[in-house]
Image (cartoon, grey):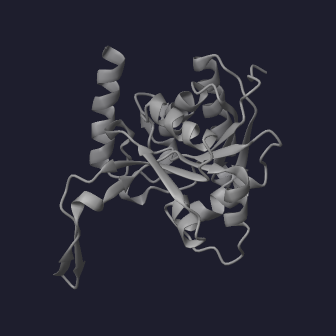
């Protein structure tokens, strides 16, 4: 196995979500862009990060074999083989991450939780997150400025307007010191969340931000998928 001596980062990819807003009747991570699933595109990027020495994919129970083939394809394409596990994903993202933590390796010092639905995250963003963890941050998230004005609305009526200067859109990978993530998920009454760093906040743990990227956009709707196909075509035609 080609694992560098300092490959102490584990990447967890929760890939069990149904992606109902895409309307394609299959788990979102297995939706394809130009014959590459979102999952395999994300894994390809992860394998390019030298510090990553372990990969865990949380997949629906009936997609385990398919997950293995997507991982295998990405490994062959990149030419870098690292230890990996496929675990059964839960009904929620929180359940999937919790199941993933059960197979962490002794060498996994840091854990990055990454959305399969963000297949184009630049390598630099991964490296920014890992660098902050190296410097001692316990939880690190990539963020970008919010371009829209955000209002709180209840019953179709505007309640107030939030100060856009203080608002950030949160992306992945979200990085954690291993013991911090394990501690957060050891709580029995975990509330399902779309954001692992949110659990850290609830536990009173300081969360550090680094610069994210517009290329880290998340594929949620059919329109996002169209944008992703265009983006992918531009990337490979360069």
Q: Residue at x 73, y 22 (%)?
A: 4
194 and 170: which is toward the camera: 170
178 and 14: which is toward the camera: 178
Q: Residue at x 35, y 27 (%)?
A: 232
Q: Position of residue 147 (x, y in %)?
A: 21, 52
Q: Is residue 23 visible?
A: no
On the picture, is 20 further left or further right than 165?
Answer: right
Q: Position of residue 127 (x, y in %)?
A: 53, 33
Location of residue 200 by image quarter: bottom right
Q: Residue at x 68, y 58 (%)?
A: 180
Q: Quadrant of the N terminus?
A: top right
Furthest toward the bottom, the residue is 155
On the picture, is 52 further left or further right than 157?
Answer: right
Furthest toward the front, the residue is 135
Q: Position of residue 238 (x, y in %)?
A: 31, 14
Q: Is residue 48 visible?
A: yes
On the picture, is 127 further left or further right than 226?
Answer: right
| Residue 201 vertical position relative to residue 177 in the rendered view, above or below | below
Location of residue 52 by image quarter: top right
Q: Residue at x 69, y 60 (%)?
A: 98
| Residue 70 vertical position relative to residue 207 in the rendered view, above or below | above
61 and 215: which is toward the camera: 215
Furthest toward the right, the residue is 106
| Residue 13 vertical position relative to residue 91 in the rendered view, above or below | above
Q: Position of residue 214 (x, y in %)?
A: 32, 40
On the picture, is 75 further left or further right than 127?
Answer: right
- Tally of numbered discs: 0
């Amino acid at each position: 196995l080609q694992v560098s001596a300092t490959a102490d980062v584990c990447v967890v990819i929760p890939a069990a979500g149904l992606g109902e807003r895409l309307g394609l009747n299959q788990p979102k991570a297995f939706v394809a862009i130009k014959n590459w699933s979102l999952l395999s595109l994300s894994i390809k990027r992860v394998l390019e990060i030298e510090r990553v020495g372990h990969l865990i994919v949380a997949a629906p129970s009936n997609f385990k074999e398919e997950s293995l083939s997507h991982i295998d394809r990405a490994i062959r394409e990149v030419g870098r083989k690292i230890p990996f596990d496929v675990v059964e994903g839960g009904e929620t993202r929180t359940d999937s991450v919790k199941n993933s933590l059960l197979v962490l390796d002794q060498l996994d010092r840091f854990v990055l939780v990454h959305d399969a639905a963000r297949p184009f995250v630049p390598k630099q963003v991964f490296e920014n997150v890992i660098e902050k963890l190296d410097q001692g941050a316990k939880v690190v998230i990539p963020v970008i400025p919010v371009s829209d004005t955000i209002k709180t609305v209840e019953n179709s009526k505007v309640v107030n307007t939030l100060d856009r200067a203080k608002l950030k859109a949160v992306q992945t990978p979200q990085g954690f010191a291993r013991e911090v993530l394990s501690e957060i998920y050891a709580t029995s009454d975990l509330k399902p969340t779309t954001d692992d760093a949110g659990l850290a906040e609830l536990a009173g743990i300081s969360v550090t931000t680094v610069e994210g990227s517009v290329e880290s956009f998340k594929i949620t709707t059919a329109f996002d998928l169209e944008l992703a196909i265009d983006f992918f075509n531009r990337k490979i035609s360069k």
